[in-house]
Image (spheres, helix red, strand yellow):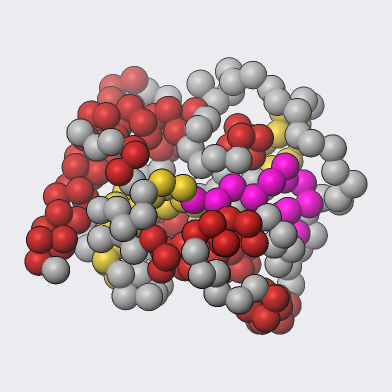
Amino acid sequence: EMVAAKPTQPRKRAGAAHAKIAPGDLPARLEAIAEHEKPPASLKDLQRALQSCRACPLWRDATQAVPGEGAEEPLLALVGEQPGDQEDLAGHPFVGPAGKVLDRALAEAGINRGELFVTNAVKHFKHEPRGKRRLHMRPNAGEVEICRWWLAHELTLVKPRLIVALGATALQSLSTYKGTLTKAREQTLKTREGATLRATVHPSYLLRLPDEAAKEAEFARFVADLKDSKQLAERIARAA
Ligand code: URA
């Protein structure tokens, strides 16, 4: 589905390819954002400030930063990896092929997307050109760590009852958990800030499965994880 998607053209930028972030550079860069960007007072402020983030080089080749969006004080916040090609152009998270899978799973789980907050660990689309296509590249640990500043502030402002990491990148950003995603999926974890966290697969993983039977079985597990997360969030809300 993703491969068959229409090629899209990035906005032309003078920017070079991805400059590497040297490990020693990281604290200085983090300090630079902390100094430049006061903690945003509202989600609107954060969305505005995010557009001028230059803390890592990913902004150069992206059309725009894609902030999280959705309900405030929701039961669930879903955190993906980074915007894809279509999200980069539209400025909204999960509107491309992975978003379609997510929407289908949410519908099966009886969850209305409007009740959720949906965001990403990294806010700019990292990609490499391949002909007319822009191929997704996984953000590296430094980029994830830098962008955590924005994610942590989003979640502090939005105050979900439960956060769900969609895939390993989100899990890495949100928690210090060092086990596999498979193991993380069986537990209730905590974020670095102490919020309740669940983990499941990224919807793109389902798109990549070559076998129809496996696809169906894994989709059903994904739906079950989402349902389970909603039930846990409801229990947390009742106990508060
Ligand atoms: N994949 C993600 O992780 N996030 C999006 O917004 C789209 C695709």
Frontmost residue, 17 versus 32: 32
Relative placement, left or right, of 192 versus 62 is left
Main secondary structure type of the part rendered in magenta:
loop
Q: Is residue 166 visible?
A: no
How far across and how far down the image is residue 3, in percent? 58, 23
Q: Residue at x 74, y 63 (%)?
A: 54
Q: Residue at x 28, y 25 (%)?
A: 216
**Number of marks present in the image shown:** 0
Relative placement, left or right, of 58 versus 148 is right
How far across and how far down the image is residue 165, in percent? 37, 54
Q: Reply yes or no: does residue 66 show up in magenta.
A: yes
How far across and how far down the image is residue 119, in percent? 46, 50
Q: Residue at x 74, y 72 (%)?
A: 22
How far across and how far down the image is residue 151, in percent? 49, 62
Q: Quadrant location of residue 145?
A: bottom right
Check the picture and name the quadrant holding the C terminus: bottom left
Q: Quadrant location of residue 83?
A: top right
Up the image or down, 225 lies above or below 141; here it is: above
Q: Which residues are magenta?
A: 56-68
